[in-house]
Amino acid sequence: MVKYKIAHDKDLCIGCGACVSMCPDNWEIDDEGKAKIINDEVENIGCNKDAKDSCPVDCIKIKEIK
Ligand code: SF4
């Protein structure tokens, strides 16, 4: 079963909230006002791809893992 690993570079994140809007099931804004992944390994990429595509600073990376 292919799974996906989602990585988020918090240093680059500007806290715009686009990822949370696109994928509220797996993204939230933390106490520092930056995005936070709820589950960083998922079986189905689902809306995480939309979150990645919506990020203006390209700080979300998605990798397939076995
Ligand atoms: S879309 Fe990108 S910059 Fe905006 S909050 Fe999410 S991870 Fe941060």
Image (cartoon, grey):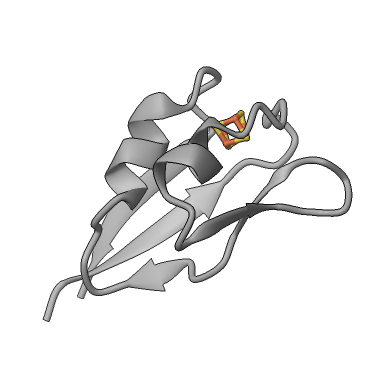
Q: Quadrant of the N terminus?
A: bottom left
Q: Quadrant of the C terminus?
A: bottom left
25 vs 64, nearest the viewer: 25
44 relative position to 59: left or right: left
64 vs 24, nearest the viewer: 24
29 relative position to 58: left or right: right
Residue found at the far right of this picture: 32
Identify whether 9 is placed above or below 29: above
Q: Residue 55, position in %: x, y?
A: 48, 27
- Residue placed at 87% from the left, 53% from the top? 31
How many numbered tags mark residues here?
Answer: 0
Identify whether 15 is placed above or below 33: above
Residue found at the far top of this picture: 56
Q: Residue 51, position in %: x, y?
A: 40, 39
- Residue placed at 65% from the left, 26% from the top? 16
Q: Residue 61, position in %: x, y?
A: 42, 42
Instruction: Give the quarter the ligand 1 occupies.
Output: top right
- Residue placed at 41% from the left, 26% from the top? 54
Which quarter of the picture shows residue 46? Answer: bottom left
